[in-house]
Image (cartoon, coloured by chain):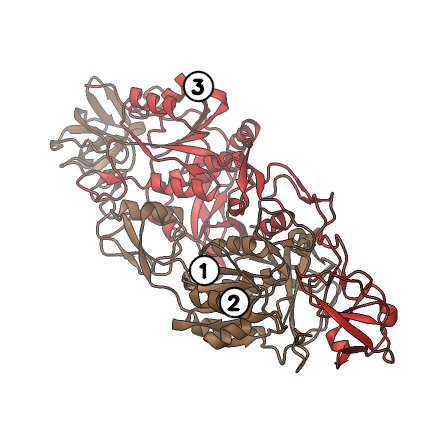
Chain colours: A brown, B red
Amino acid sequence: MTAPFFDVRNKGFGPRTPVADVFKLLDARVASLPAEAVSLGEAAGRVLAGSVTAAVNIPGFARAAMDGFAVRAADARIDNPLSLVGESLPGRPFAGTVATGQAVRIMTGAPLPNGADAVLRVEAAEEAEGRVRAQAAIAPGRDLGRIGEDVLAGSEVLAAGRRLRPQDVGMLAALGIGTIAAIRRPRVAILATGDELLPPGSKPEGCRIVDSNSPMLAALIHRDGGVPLPVRYVPDRLEAVRTALAEADADAIVVSGGSSVGKEDHAPRSLAELGELAVHGIAIRPAGPTGIGFLQCGMPVFLLPGNPVACLCGYDLFAGRAIRRMGGRDSDVPYRKDAAPLRTAIGSAKGRLDYVRVRLIDGEVEPIPGRGGSLLSTAVAADGFILVDAERESLPSGELVDVWLFDG
Amino acid sequence: MTAPFFDVRNKGFGPRTPVADVFKLLDARVASLPAEAVSLGEAAGRVLAGSVTAAVNIPGFARAAMDGFAVRAADARIDNPLSLVGESLPGRPFAGTVATGQAVRIMTGAPLPNGADAVLRVEAAEEAEGRVRAQAAIAPGRDLGRIGEDVLAGSEVLAAGRRLRPQDVGMLAALGIGTIAAIRRPRVAILATGDELLPPGSKPEGCRIVDSNSPMLAALIHRDGGVPLPVRYVPDRLEAVRTALAEADADAIVVSGGSSVGKEDHAPRSLAELGELAVHGIAIRPAGPTGIGFLQCGMPVFLLPGNPVACLCGYDLFAGRAIRRMGGRDSDVPYRKDAAPLRTAIGSAKGRLDYVRVRLIDGEVEPIPGRGGSLLSTAVAADGFILVDAERESLPSGELVDVWLFDG
């Protein structure tokens, strides 16, 4: 008879670490990665490693803000017909100077010719036979865009830590910037343990099931700005798990399965032997059997439960937090939070946070039956989740709760 | 002297199309694209073209929901020591049958052996010298996961139109699905007009400016699920614009610049000649000089203003709406909407929707000065925008308004 595969000394985990303490640990020990050069075409969604200061004025020249005529404002009088002496188009300026009594046709965005100090709008002018008359007086500076009116050279345009929006990318282009310094995307190794697992794309067969956690984790890592590395399947043997952990060439590791205290749960022991198992067992359901530790140079390692909802929950709250931090993003789960009343009372064990999948029905929160971690369909059917505080034993119907929404 | 480049007949646009009518036009004439096969590794974020029905039960076998012992429930009595005859691990089932008086050590997720009808949890058992005793009676079915408890074969798991979440991808893998039918991503041609434009990566020089719209549009198209094609720079000549429109091999086209009624605005005439210019001039500021039409097979074409904020606004509301629809996504702008009170009164011209960039300050909405379309810095500095209804001439301080937020 082999030794029992569960921990007979304490029949499970000892005291579990509160979720808030895990957050503190991660926030203290996981920092953002160094910068790398990223071309403008790849810059949207990336996080700036440093601030961006304008090296040039935008615009770099006075320009027309409207279609019309570049004139000297003092000339704009109804009784003063002006000679039309040329035109200024964007990129094709009028080469001469506008003298008293002259006008130059100008298009929005085109450079203001020398000599002119205002734009007479086309709809405020009368034009006939090469002469232009203003219908009313205008002030100097009228309908001009002045140098630097959009951006002044020397000003800070984007702050360090900014996650670049499409319009930011446009602004960087306008400033003459073709490459930015962005925080490097964390490369995350995915180790899947479980001899029962078939790789995605296989059909489930007999008592073998298809690995659902690795493709889910790859999508989660990608969503959080990380680069998921090709999945490595690791046999349920201590040496194999230890070797896979030691060999991973990555910024972080997530291990799926084998995270608990049973005989087949080799990851915690391997991590403790190779580096540090800082947390094992967290006061949360269903991701309780999660381990967190560090390898050389502080590389974080997350031992996630094999049960798919527990894996999802453990990723989103813990592994994802680290990956988001490494990439310079907001640490919090990237789900929109709404407040809504409970439609049904919820019971919850005291002493652990409860991650409850819920549906939103007519603006009310309805828990989905099946609180454990084994039924992935509950997370597929859910609109989101609520977190029931460790101190609460139940929430009454009607209580306003925070809901994190999986979509949008 | 060349002909004037603005439209002297009507000095600008005629009656502008209301925004709601543009939405109706797009919703009537732009449909989602056909399906394509997508592998699971690329499936997250894609939109399902059809529903997905389970071909198998999950799990396909009865399994242990806890670590413990597979037994016959009737045997679970404190006075009835059971013989431990083997073990069942995930993927490595117990090959024999559990007879009366026998127990098989079993791990969470492992197949329930023949003969057994319940799991005695490890913490509810005493084990010594190859014998196991239950501390209390258990019912048949206790701590078992039954066949199909997660997903029943034949049931619909994901509906057509679903944008796949990470957990959906996991579910598809578990069901034995390696490829899905997803709505094809629209391929969008970007034509940049404007002889004054230098390509991104250049430094602005003299009266030439760097193209900021194309990289912004590429990022917007990508965000909305489209595939931006390499930017094509088109000279400000009618034939060149017409040729570029005619030659574009894409599902949709966005043209940046030259969209208005001036002499250099060749895109509207080109589109009208090649196909249909359905809308020219929209009752919105600053994206008023926007054109919308269709080429062969109903391919939508968007003529966006060259002014960068007008381009952003015109893309988000009109071009993006079509691209999102083609890809099977929600038509609405993909920004989170919040309600907040105005910090300052806002004036607004009647008869057109006003797209006002705003900051959120202490939970209040503060408009950013500079309402026109030429200052991209206003969209960089903004937290989001509000839309002031065409019927309103002003909004008083304190009024609760909808704010669309650029981030998150």
Q: Please, which chain is the residue tagged with disc 1 on?
A: A
- Image location of residue A348, percent across then percent down: 71, 70
Q: Nearer the viewer, residue B130 or A304?
A: B130
- Image location of residue B75, percent across then percent down: 86, 72
Where residue A80 sits, quadrant-wise, is top left
Q: Nearer the viewer, residue B354 or B143?
A: B143
Horizontal relation, residue B253 to residue A219: left or right: left
Quadrant, the N terminus of chain B = top left
In this figure, which residue is indicated by the disc labeled 1?
A188
Residue B372 shows in the view = no
Mark 2 or 1: in front is 2
In this figure, which residue is indicated by the disc labeled 2?
A241
- Image location of residue B119, percent across then percent down: 78, 68
Q: How far is disc 2 from disc 1 in space, using C-alphas?
A: 16 Å
- Image location of residue A24, percent across then percent down: 50, 74
Q: How many marks?
A: 3
In this figure, which residue is indicated by the disc labeled 3?
B275
Horizontal relation, residue A8 to residue A291: left or right: right
